[in-house]
Image (spheres, rainbow, N blue to C red):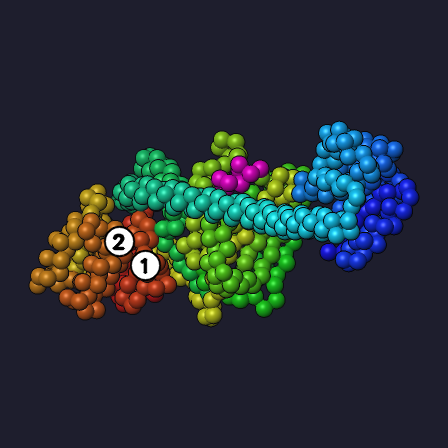
């Protein structure tokens, strides 16, 4: 090492002699004129101190002792003290004072050059070991700092992962909760549909049997109106549960948005400005047009209520490609190509606790009697059932954005299915001589359908369970049409229809469902000679649909 020996021997030629002796063995020296200069030099790398006893006693030891006490933990600077000539006993008497210098060595005269050189080289080796220790400690400290940095970095990474995991767990819990509520809601709606089927069916038959002058007819009409409202409520529930029968077709959302703009402006009033931002080259999507229109109108009304003093309502469309699964509070959006319908308002927005529950059925912040809490839940169920997604972004005072993702569709525009009202026409019972097999596990619904069809002149066979229906199908009885519920005990109506057609090829089938158990039962996927109706079914709709099927119309 190139660190010098510090010499402090200002009297006589001692310093010069020491310098020459050490130079002979290649040791570097630096002479200090006084004690302050010596203390200042201790701040740099040095090999050792060589002091004369006389110089030390004249200058005082206290400043030097203070500097040596301030050394870092790894340092123990060697100090060589050349005692006064002929004063050996005196130096021994001051040994206790010299010990305050720490790593001290006394060199008594007469001092040979070889002895001084050996003592200096020994001190240098000791000092070199100290500097190696310093280097090791520096490496250890550096490694420790790096380790602490990596630990801190990994800790932050773990915290971020934990936050993402908690976010994913919360999203999963929310999705599971929505799924559980959806199953419960769908089951309740299914049972209500069966009850409404019996109630409304019998009310319609009673209405048809009463004369126009019958006073009771008014009460029957009121009961039918109430039943229709209850049926609409169950449709909302089934929409949330993703079990509503849909009539999807290829849609141009731009054209639909333009067509709805007038109705939306009329619904929100003049204080709200409606703005449309429609993407060029928008893809087509596959969805139920009526449901999309209903969603747009419900969202517009919600936006109006959030902007009592007026504001801006923006309807936007765009193409969106997701390369990977995107998770949010409402669940996962799977990778794919979507057509995005986004409706944004500048209203009051939602606090986090309200936003978290926005899609839950029956949750509403509106006063009692002013909202059912089913609008957003119906939108959510419709989006998921259509293979898409619905998401909400909102902050208090910043407005709300609702995004509806619908899957891209490459097909041509589809035609709307004819409405039940258009199909319903007067029937001539005298021409209805066919045989119909009706399968329904709900006894009251079965009785209603049998009576309604027998009243039209059909020969009706009935079965309350799939096994009884199979026995009839395997018999020699002539059967022109199978009318079956979808949700049967032990076997679905779809499976029963497949078995029936294997026994009787070409058999026409009418499915009647409380909710859509399978996507394959959506109206767009029904094959020839097959139709589907959703409970509650009007008696006249049932009769006209049966007649159309028997006449060869399965559109």
The percent coordinates of residue 165 (x first, y second) are 48, 47
Query: Considering depth in this image, is 434 or 508 the residue closer to the camera?
Result: 508
- Give the residue at x 16% y 53%: 466
Can residue 471 be seen here?
A: yes
Counting residues from the start of the chain, the first of labels 1 and 2 encountered is 2
In the picture of the structure, the residue carrying the numbered disc 1 is 521
- Give the residue at x 78% y 46%: 111
From what the image shows, is residue 534 above or below residue 92? below
In the picture of the structure, the residue carrying the numbered disc 2 is 486
- Give the residue at x 33% y 50%: 515
Q: Quadrant of the N terminus?
A: bottom right
Looking at the rendered structure, the secondary structure element under dot 1 is helix
Within 10 Å of disc 1 (Cα), the crowding (few <14, some 14-19, many 20+) is: many
The percent coordinates of residue 480 (x first, y second) are 18, 63
Query: Considering depth in this image, is 500 or 450 the residue closer to the camera?
Result: 500
Question: Is residue 355 covered in magenta?
Answer: yes
Bounds of the magenta segment: 351-359
């Amino acid at each position: 090492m190139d660190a010098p020996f510090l010499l402090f021997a200002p009297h006589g030629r001692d310093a010069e002699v020491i310098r020459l002796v050490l130079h002979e063995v290649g040791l570097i020296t630096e002479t200090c004129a006084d004690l302050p200069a010596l203390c200042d030099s201790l701040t740099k790398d040095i090999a050792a101190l060589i002091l004369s006893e006389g110089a030390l006693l004249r200058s005082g030891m206290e400043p030097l002792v203070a500097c040596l006490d301030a050394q870092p933990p790894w340092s123990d600077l060697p100090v060589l003290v050349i005692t006064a000539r002929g004063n050996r006993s005196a130096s021994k008497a001051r040994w206790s004072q010299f010990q305050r210098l720490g790593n001290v060595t006394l060199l008594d005269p007469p001092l040979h050059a070889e002895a001084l050189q050996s003592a200096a080289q020994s001190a240098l080796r000791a000092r070199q070991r100290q500097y190696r220790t310093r280097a090791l400690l520096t490496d250890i400290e550096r490694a420790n700092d790096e380790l602490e940095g990596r630990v801190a970095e990994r800790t932050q990474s773990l915290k971020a992962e934990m936050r993402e995991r908690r976010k994913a767990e919360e999203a999963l819990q929310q999705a599971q909760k929505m799924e559980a509520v959806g199953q419960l809601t769908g089951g309740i709606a299914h049972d209500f549909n069966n009850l409404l089927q019996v109630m409304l069916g019998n009310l319609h038959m009673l209405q048809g049997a009463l004369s126009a002058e019958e006073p009771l007819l008014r009460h029957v009409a009121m009961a039918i109106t109430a039943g229709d409202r209850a049926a609409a409520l169950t449709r909302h529930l089934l929409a949330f549960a993703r079990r509503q029968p849909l009539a999807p077709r290829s849609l141009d959302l731009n054209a639909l948005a333009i067509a709805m703009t007038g109705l939306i402006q009329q619904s929100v009033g003049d204080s709200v400005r409606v703005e449309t931002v429609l993407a060029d080259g928008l893809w087509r999507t596959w969805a139920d047009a009526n449901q999309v229109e209903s969603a747009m109108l419900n969202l517009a009304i919600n936006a109006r209520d959030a902007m009592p003093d007026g504001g801006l309502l923006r309807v936007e469309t765009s193409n969106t490609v997701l390369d990977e699964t995107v998770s949010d509070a409402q669940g996962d959006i799977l990778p794919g190509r979507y057509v995005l319908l986004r409706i944004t308002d500048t209203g009051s927005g939602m606090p986090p606790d309200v936003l978290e529950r926005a899609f839950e059925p029956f949750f509403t912040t509106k006063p009692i009697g002013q909202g059912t809490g089913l609008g957003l839940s119906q939108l959510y169920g419709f989006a998921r059932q259509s293979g898409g997604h619905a998401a909400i972004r909102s902050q208090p005072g910043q407005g709300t954005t609702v995004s509806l993702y619908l899957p891209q569709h490459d097909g041509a525009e589809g035609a709307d299915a004819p409405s039940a009202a258009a199909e319903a026409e007067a029937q001539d019972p005298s021409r209805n001589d066919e045989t119909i097999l009706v399968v329904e596990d709900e006894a009251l619904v079965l009785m209603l359908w049998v009576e309604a069809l027998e009243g039209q002149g059909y020969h009706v066979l009935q079965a309350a369970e799939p096994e009884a229906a199979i026995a009839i199908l395997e018999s020699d009885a002539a059967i022109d049409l199978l009318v079956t519920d979808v949700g049967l005990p032990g076997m679905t109506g779809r499976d029963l229809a497949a078995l029936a057609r294997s026994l009787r090829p070409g058999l026409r089938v009418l499915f009647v469902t409380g909710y859509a158990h399978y996507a394959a039962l959506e109206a767009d996927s029904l094959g020839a000679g097959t139709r589907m109706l959703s409970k509650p079914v009007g008696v006249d709709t049932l009769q006209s649909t049966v007649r159309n099927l028997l006449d060869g119309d399965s559109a």
